[in-house]
């Protein structure tokens, strides 16, 4: 059986994009935070910042197309009732960051700063604006400038708690395998699904719920192919009549796939089944070269295919799954 573990790990190294790997995003982040500190209105309350999203979770990937992004939380030391119109705080952030070399736009979930080169967007940074209610729960400012006042709302959103939950779900090498599998799934999604309604956070939280670390019981090395196949089988087993529901484990406890149409959900399921079948077919190959040719069709050209002469035949070995370590 071919598990192609070396190729999965090389693939992961090729596609990963993290805070440590992107000096450009890292420098832009520091510049933005300095601008925010130096230019924010004196009328604005004090605030703190934190990383959120894929950078905080270490599950970011280089995009196939489009510009890479980073998510930052800006949490103001105030209560929602202090600013019944949350747009006020978002304007403070927007105005402090506006410069000639970037565009700054208030979008409904965040303030987006986009950088351009030769007329093309090179990367963007999203800043989500928060307050804290009397129960200590963070509230997200959800509004645009064009929204009517009644549509400018504070919505429960526990981004820091989500990062902690997902990060603490696994430890050490199990956590590394979790991140490799999530990144591979996200690149597969970018390769195979032609719409944007399968959100990265949905795949990450699905793995949070149903991923189980998997390794060779003989040599103790993790086997990403089988871990991914098992995760996909768990997702498929939980499909309802026509949909998969993946609930956020923190407020606002929403279904992360709720925006998908039934047609998109059907396509998503069929493509997951195709991926699962490809993983099975690859594992059954006696030759790693042939296995990787099958896998490359699913994950794209960044998945390496070794020269036939350099591949080895792998005999069947025991597979073990580990318990979750919190």
Image (spheres, grey):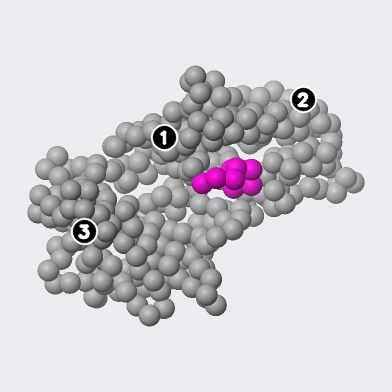
The residue depicted at 31 percent of the width and 46 percent of the height is 160
Q: Does the magenta portion include 140?
A: no
Disc 2 designates what residue? 316
Report the front residue among 263 and 19.
Answer: 263
Q: Position of residue 98 (x, y in %)?
A: 32, 74
Q: Position of residue 273 (x, y in %)?
A: 64, 28
Disc 1 designates what residue? 258
Q: Residue furthest toward the left? A: 82
| Left or right of residue 139: residue 285 | right
Q: Earlier in the sequence, mark 2 or mark 1?
A: 1
Residue at mark 1 to residue at mark 3: CA–CA distance: 26 Å
Q: Residues within 10 Å of mark 2 (few under 14, many from 20)?
A: few
Q: Position of residue 84 (x, y in %)?
A: 12, 52
Report the front residue among 311 and 69.
Answer: 69
Label 1 SS: loop
User: In this picture, which residue range is highlighted in magenta?
Assistant: 188-196
Q: Earlier in the sequence, mark 1 or mark 3?
A: 3
Q: Residues within 10 Å of mark 3 (few under 14, many from 20)?
A: many
Q: Nearer the viewer, mark 3 or mark 2?
A: 3
Q: Earlier in the sequence, mark 3 or mark 2?
A: 3
Q: Quadrant of the C terminus?
A: top left
Disc 3 designates what residue? 87
Q: Residues within 10 Å of mark 1 (few under 14, many from 20)?
A: some
Label 3 SS: helix
Residue at mark 3 to residue at mark 2: CA–CA distance: 60 Å
């Amino acid at each position: 059986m071919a598990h192609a573990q070396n190729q999965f790990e090389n693939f992961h190294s090729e596609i990963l994009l993290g805070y440590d790997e992107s000096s450009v995003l890292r420098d832009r982040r520091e510049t933005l935070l300095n601008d925010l500190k130096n230019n924010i209105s004196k009328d604005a309350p004090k605030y703190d910042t934190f990383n959120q999203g894929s950078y905080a979770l270490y599950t970011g990937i280089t995009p196939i197309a489009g510009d890479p992004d980073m998510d930052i939380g800006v949490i103001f030391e105030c209560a929602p009732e202090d600013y019944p119109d949350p747009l006020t705080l978002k304007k403070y952030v927007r105005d402090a960051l506006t410069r000639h070399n970037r565009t700054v736009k208030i979008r409904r979930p965040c303030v987006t700063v986009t950088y351009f080169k030769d007329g093309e967007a090179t990367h963007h940074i999203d800043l989500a604006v928060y307050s804290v209610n009397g129960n200590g729960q963070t509230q997200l400012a959800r509004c645009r400038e064009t929204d009517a006042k009644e549509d400018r709302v504070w919505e429960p959103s526990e981004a820091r708690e989500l990062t902690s939950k997902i990060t603490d779900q696994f430890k050490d090498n199990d956590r590394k395998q979790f991140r490799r599998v999530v990144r591979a799934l996200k690149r597969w999604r970018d390769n195979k699904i032609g719409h944007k309604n399968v959100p990265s956070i949905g795949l990450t939280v699905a793995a949070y719920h149903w991923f189980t670390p998997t390794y060779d019981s003989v040599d103790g090395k993790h086997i990403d192919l089988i871990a991914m196949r098992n995760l996909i089988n768990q997702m498929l087993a939980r499909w309802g009549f026509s949909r998969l529901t993946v609930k956020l484990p923190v407020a606002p406890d929403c279904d992360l796939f709720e925006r998908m149409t039934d047609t998109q959900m059907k396509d998503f399921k069929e493509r997951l089944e195709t991926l699962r079948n490809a993983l099975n077919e690859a594992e059954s190959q006696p030759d790693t070269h042939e296995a990787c040719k099958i896998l490359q069709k699913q994950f794209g050209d960044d998945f390496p295919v070794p020269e036939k002469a350099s591949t080895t035949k792998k005999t069947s070995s025991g597979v073990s799954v580990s318990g979750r370590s919190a």
